[in-house]
Image (tube, rainbow, N blue to C red):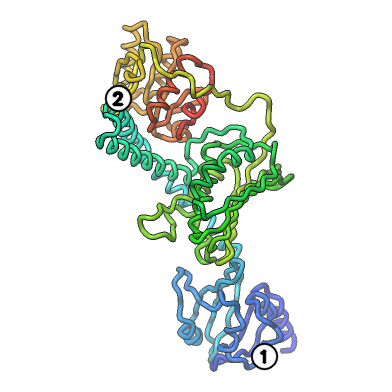
Amino acid sequence: LKEQSRLLETIFENINDGLSVFDENNRLIAWNPQYVSILELPANQLKPGMPIESIHPLLSQEAQDSWALDGMALDRDEVNQLRKQRTQRFERHFPGGRVVEFRSNPMPDGGFVTLYSDLTERKTIEAQLRQSQKMEVLGQLTGGVAHDFNNLLAAIFGNLQLLEDSLPAGGKQLRYAQRALSAAERGKSLTQRLLAFSRKQLLQPETTEVDGLIEGMLDLMEYSVGEQTEIQLDLQAADWWVSVDPSQLENALLNLAINSSAAMPNGGSVSFKTRQLTDQLLNGRRCDLLAITVSDTGCGIPQSILRRVFEPFFTTKEIGEGSGLGLSMVYGFVKQSNGDIHITSAEGKGTQIEIWLPRVIETTTQANSTLSTQENTKGSGQHVLLVEDDAQVAQTAEALLESLGYQVTVVNHAAGAMDALDKANDVALVLTDINLGSAVNGVQLSDMINARWSALPVLLTSGLHKQQLKQRYGLLDSHALLAKPYTRDELAVAVHRRLNHPTASLGGQGNDASG
């Protein structure tokens, strides 16, 4: 009996989990050291025979509520009564994001014994898995609707811009058209945010100097957050470069500034800080990092919802006041740019978001040789062969090209395109959709044209994201791509550059054009 007693005592004292025993009157009989440490109780105030009602106030405020495993709040007194009758499992949340599981079992002579397990690490992994699954589902959803939705937007954009040109300045009709065009822009932005969260947004990464980019958008941020919010800069990463889509980085930082401003209805400050971190671990490899920290003096975020802020459509705003895609868009953009993002916040103490991006070494030859967007992009009667199976998009694109000064021939499949090229010897460029709804897609058509007329430039267009085009149609980085929906200006620049600079990067309108 002594040996068994010593064995049980050794197990009781040295197991990793906390353990406590209460009698039928809810009085503490025994406990181990881990019970004290896991529940963060003051050891000098625990005494044998102490009622459970006296122990509860010793817990931190966050840990005094019990939660079912499905997230439902539980009544504390009811749970304590049920613990003496049958097995009970529930959770309590502690400061710093710790989660402790309580597993109580009744004892034959009355009372109950409870095992306490720290589930913080497991919960973190589960949350990451759920986030990954949500992103995968959202990616499949957006990928499935992107083609049709972007085709609709392409037709809406083009027709509204053509209508805008035909209306007298200052009239009501022009305002109506401009209002509809603005709504179409919001639809395009919503699609991009969904794609950004799913990490499938078409990005155009460039070697970017972040300090200069932030300084350059200071006026825009000050205008966007309003007079009550002060913008502070502490930029310490001069001459360090990262590979990102600069326009999307600007959108992400502006989004964070606007969110911070919304958390400070009575005014406050938002600070942008950059710093250089050497030899850090990111995504399983060591590298130099450029850290961007956005901090505010706002109301902060409750710990109960902090872990959900990057979820798509999650918002604390009233219905109609926000889509819930702002922070998820930032999250997706950073992850797609091979970076990482962290958020810390406390109620009444503001919020801090830190973005890590891997440093790249600047070279004298930049990643993308850009052409001036101010150059004349009008056509001068060149013959463009348009291949598009969607009748509305074809009619709109034809009208846009003609308004830009091009002569246009329209066909709706690859066989018609090859026949037209056989008959006409003056075609200067082929603009073709990729998904043509036939056996031969636009990528295959481009390769067929290149094999027979190697000097004839081809510009592909699609509403699908680039990764999906690579997997489904065999798109290569060498193929020039204009993403749908495109504006007339984007179409003008893409066609002009493909005609006049066939070996140059198409920049914002080219292989990864998405806005």
Which part of the image, by quadrant, shows the C terminus?
Answer: top left
Which residue occupies the foreground of this view, 466 or 169? 169
Lateral position of residue 124 relative to residue 364, left or right = left
Cα distance between the residues tagged 1 and 2: 82 Å
Q: Quadrant of residue 342?
A: bottom right
Residues at badges 1 and 2 in contact (C-beta under 8 Å)? no
Q: Which residue is mark 2?
A: 394
Relative to 253, residue 53 above or below: below
- Above or below, comparing residue 170 to residue 92 in the picture: above
Find residue 223 and report its horizontal and vertical position in percent: 50, 46
Task: Evaluate whether residue 132 shows in this view.
Answer: no
**276 to 508, vertically: above or below:** below
What residue is at 51 percent from the left and 16 percent from the top? 501
Residue shown at the point (57%, 61%) measured from the top left: 350
Residue 237 point in image, percent of width and height: 69, 42
Q: Quadrant of the N terminus?
A: bottom right
For marks 1 and 2 on the same chain, the one whose residue lies earlier in the sequence: 1
The residue that label 1 is drawn on is 47
Amino acid type shown at disc 1: Lys
440 horizontally vs 271: left or right: left
Determine whether the residue tagged by mark 1 lies in a helix, strand or loop: loop
Amino acid type shown at disc 2: Ala
Disc 1 crowd rating (10 Å Cα; few below 14, some 14-19, many 20+) is some
Question: Which residue does the image show at 55% across and 86% down from the upper left?
Answer: 112
The image shows residue 284 at horizontal and vertical percentages of: 66, 46
Element marked by disc 2: helix
Q: Which mark is residue 494?
A: none
Res 41 → quadrant: bottom right
Of labels 1 and 2, the one closer to you: 2
Residue 397 in sight here? yes
